[in-house]
Image: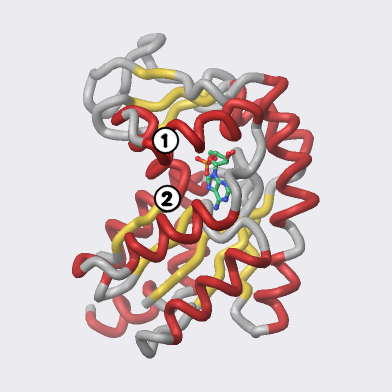
Amino acid sequence: MDIILIGPPGAGKGTQALAIEQQLGVTHIASGDLFRAAIKQGTPLGLQAQEYMNRGALVPDDLVINMIIERVLRPDCAEGVLFDGFPRTEAQAVALDAALAKHQRQIDSVLFLDVPADILVKRMAGRQICGLCGAIHNIYFFPSKRPGVCDQCGDLLYQRSDDTFETARRRIDVYFTQTRPLIEYYSQQGKLVEVDGLRPIEQVTESMLEALGVLQALERMA
Ligand code: AMP
C-alpha cells in the first residue's frame, strides 16, 4: 500500500505518521527528516537544502525528487510507503506517479489532514521533538510533564530551527500557494480522504485507519 499524508505544516502529520506506520507496517518516508539527516551529516545535499529550509522556502523540486525516488526504490519500501511531507508541488506529484508506475505501483490513498491556518503557527512554534524516540510534544497544546524532557523515553526535547513564529508563517504561506493545489490533483484522481486534524490525536488516527480500511480488516480477523 502506498499512501500520502498531506496537510499544512503543523497539522500533525509526523505524529500521525508514527501511528500509521506501526499499524500498517509500511515504511515511513518523511522528506523533511531526510533533509535534516543530510544537514546533520554535512552532505552536499544537506548544505544545499539548509539554505532553503532556514528561510521556510521549499527545496528545489529536482533535489527533492531525486532524493525521494532513490529512497523509494530501496528494498525496505517494497511492501509500501507512507509519504510524509512529499509531494509538496505538482511537479513532485507528477514525478512520483511516473516513478511508481515504472514499477507497476501507484498511490492508493491520500490522507489530507486539515487544520485551520490560525492554529498552525502555535502548533509549529510550540513544537518540541524528542531527540531519541521522535515523540512530539507542544508547549501550548501537549506539554511534557517535565519541561524539556520526553514523557515517553526521558531523553531531551529539542526545537526545530525552522519552528520559529516568523518561519512558521512563511511556511504556511508557501503551503497555501504551492502545496494546497495538490488537493485538487488527488481529488480528481479519486484518492483523497479528508480528515479533521483538530480532534484529539487518537481520534484522528482512528479516522485515518478507518479510511484506509484497516480497522474493518482487523475487526473481520477478530
Ligand atoms: P517538514 O519537516 O516536512 O516540515 O519540512 C521541513 C522543510 O524541509 C520544509 O520547510 C522545506 O524547506 C523542506 N522540505 C521538506 N519536504 C519538502 C518537499 N517535498 N519539497 C520541498 N521542500 C521540502
Asked whether, in this view, residue 17 is left or right of residue 73, the answer is: right
The residue tagged with tag 1: helix, strand or loop?
helix
Residue drawn at point x = 57 percent, y = 25 percent:
162
Q: Nearer the viewer, residue 185 or 55?
A: 55
Q: Mark 2, mark 1: which one is toward the viewer?
A: 1
Q: Is residue 23 left or right of residue 192?
A: left
Q: Is mark 2 within 8 Å of ligand 1?
A: yes
**Which of 155/44 is in front?**
44
Residue 168: quadrant of the picture = top right
Dot 1 alpha-carbon crowd within 10 angstroms: few under 14, some 14 to 19, many 20 or more: some
What kind of element bears circle 2? Answer: strand
Q: Position of residue 179 (x, y in %)?
A: 70, 56
Vertical comparison of 31 with 52: above or below:
below
Task: Report the amino acid beneath label 2.
Answer: Ala
Left or right side of 22 for 60: right
Residue at the disc numbered 2: 30
Q: What is the residue that sits farthest to the top in this orientation?
A: 147
Percent position of residue 17, x then y: 41, 53
Please tell me the numbered disc located at residue 46: 1
The image shows residue 177 at horizontal and vertical percentages of 80, 51
Hey, which quadrant is residue 34 in on the image?
Answer: top left
Q: Quadrant of the N terminus?
A: bottom left
Q: Is residue 203 visible?
A: no
- Tell me how far mark 2 sits from mark 1, CA to CA: 15 Å
**Which amino acid lies under the numbered mark 1 shown in the image of this protein?**
Gly
Indicate how the structure is coloured in the image. secondary structure
